[in-house]
């Protein structure tokens, strides 16, 4: 397995993986342009895993200078249970740590039971003391 920082050249393969991964939901912000903007704003914080030249895993991360945010962890079904996801998370957390970030958050779909088990195994804690509220600035209901 080969791990490296994600670039916009990975977009087509990554988007295909995301569309085929249960528990990953794509929105308008996940367009090629949106991901390009995200990667430029957060250089070196997102990673891919490759096997024989094919993208088989992704993780994206960014931060606001205070907290990190992780999204789009996806591993191809044939490569799961081999430590790929955990290694992507490790690399991502190390990159955030190097940016001076000491805490990170992620959002899971409420019915993503496999995701909940995975993150709990890695030591992430489910929070019941906060609520997530969203406001759509532009672009309609899928923004």
Image (cartoon, grey):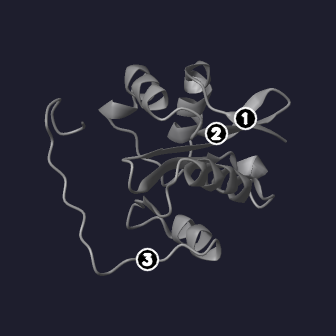
Q: Are marks 2 and 1 in contact (CB under 8 Å)?
A: yes
Q: Do callouts 1 and 3 mark residues in contact (Cβ within 8 Å)?
A: no
* Residue that appears at 61% across and 24% down: 10
**Residue 57 falls left or right of residue 143:** right
Report which residue position mark 3 lands on. 126
Which of disc 3 and disc 1 is earlier in sequence?
Answer: 1
| Front residue of this view, candidates 90 and 135 | 90
Quadrant, the C terminus: top left
Determine the CA span between mark 3 and mark 2. Answer: 24 Å
Estimate how packed mark 3 is, as few (under 14), some (14 to 19) or many (20 or more) residues with alpha carbons within 10 Å. Answer: few
Q: Earlier in the sequence, mark 2 or mark 1?
A: 1
- Identify the residue under disc 1: 4
Q: Secondary structure at mark 1?
A: strand
Picture quarter with the N terminus: top right
Residue at the (60%, 18%) spot, across then down: 9
Q: Nearer the viewer, residue 77 or 2?
A: 2
């Amino acid at each position: 397995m080969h791990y490296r920082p994600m670039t916009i050249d990975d977009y087509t393969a990554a988007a295909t993986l995301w569309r085929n991964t249960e528990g990953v939901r794509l929105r308008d912000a996940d367009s090629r342009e949106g991901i390009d903007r995200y990667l430029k704003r957060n250089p070196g914080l997102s990673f891919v895993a490759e096997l024989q030249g094919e993208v088989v895993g992704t993780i994206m991360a960014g931060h606001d200078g205070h907290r990190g945010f992780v999204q789009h962890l996806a591993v191809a079904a044939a490569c799961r249970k081999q430590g790929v996801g955990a290694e992507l998370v490790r690399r991502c957390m190390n990159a955030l740590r190097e940016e001076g970030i000491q805490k990170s958050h992620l959002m899971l779909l409420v019915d993503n039971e496999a995701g909940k088990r995975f993150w709990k195994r890695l030591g992430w804690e489910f929070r019941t003391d906060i609520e997530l509220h969203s406001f759509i600035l532009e672009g309609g209901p899928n923004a």
